[in-house]
Image (tube, rainbow, N blue to C red):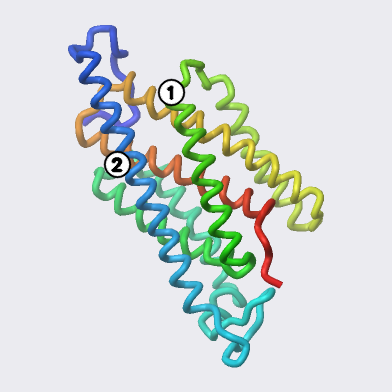
Amino acid sequence: MQQPYQQKQAYGAGFARSAVQVDQGLRTFMLGVYNNMILGLAISAVVALGINMLAVADASTGVARMGGVYLTEFGRLLYGTPLMWVVALAPLAFIFLFSFRMDRMTAASARTTFFVFAAVMGASLSTLLIRYTGASVVQVFFITAASFGALSLWGYTTSRSLSGIGSFLIMGVVGLIIASIVNIFLASSALQFAISVIGVLIFAGLTAYDTQKLKEMYLYGNYDSEAAAKVSVFGALTLYLDFINMFQFLLALFGSRNE
């Protein structure tokens, strides 16, 4: 079976597909990408909210305090012990799993793995509901959703090639990671502000770039239904990560912290 990202003959160079068939197939493919992504975000939100409900207590029953909230015994174990590092780093394990095993997964197992990853990411993101007020989290989420939708639509419809900025943006992500690690030791609020602003810009650009890249992968690749389903899951994962990262950077800029 063909590898999921392998390109064959470009459309227009011998394919027996009409323009209508290509257009319909592309819409179906992108709809599958967005459906998987939205379901992944919904899973993350439900898991984060569920863990928050189990972890947060009122002042009279709380056994520990973190920031401006009181924690239950479960919350203390989750956020106040080394278990917090397991929860925080677990999503990385799934990223590596996708990177090294995606080609050998079936479409069904890739989709299941993505949804499990979304649940684990939700557990990791539950700390945001400890640090920021619920109202600001919801507000920033909708700001992110509106921005993401506009940027993805532009990436899908623009005739301008965004391939030139792709490598630049990926280098920017590497720079963000390095700067974030350095700031763990410096604890500089000015550097954190700069990281957040640059992070929003980078993942805004990646949203448009990745959308266009997925469109071109469909147009210039020849996939059977199994391979197309796997590429759809891969695309959902890519856009999901763009959304989550943009959301976190926007929340760092505009979120109201619990006092």
* Residue that appears at 46% across and 61% down: 122
From the viewer's perspective, tell me whether residue 35 is left or right of residue 251: left
Q: Nearer the viewer, residue 86 or 193?
A: 193
How packed mark 1 is, by other alpha carbons closer than 10 Å (few <14, some 14-19, many 20 or more), is: few
The residue that label 1 is drawn on is 157
Residue 240 got which mark? none
Callout 2, which amino acid? Arg
Outermost residue, top side:
13
Q: Can you name the residue that lies furthest to the bottom here?
A: 60
Rounded to the nearest whole Å, what is the CA distance between mark 1 and mark 2?
Answer: 32 Å
Looking at the rendered structure, the secondary structure element under dot 2 is helix
Q: Position of residue 166 (x, y in %)?
A: 55, 27
Q: Quadrant of residue 62?
A: bottom right
Q: Can you tell which quarter of the image residue 33 is in? A: top left
**Residue at 31% across / 37% down in the picture?**
31
Q: Is residue 201 left or right of residue 5?
A: right
Residue bearing the label numbered 2: 104
Quadrant where the C terminus sits is bottom right
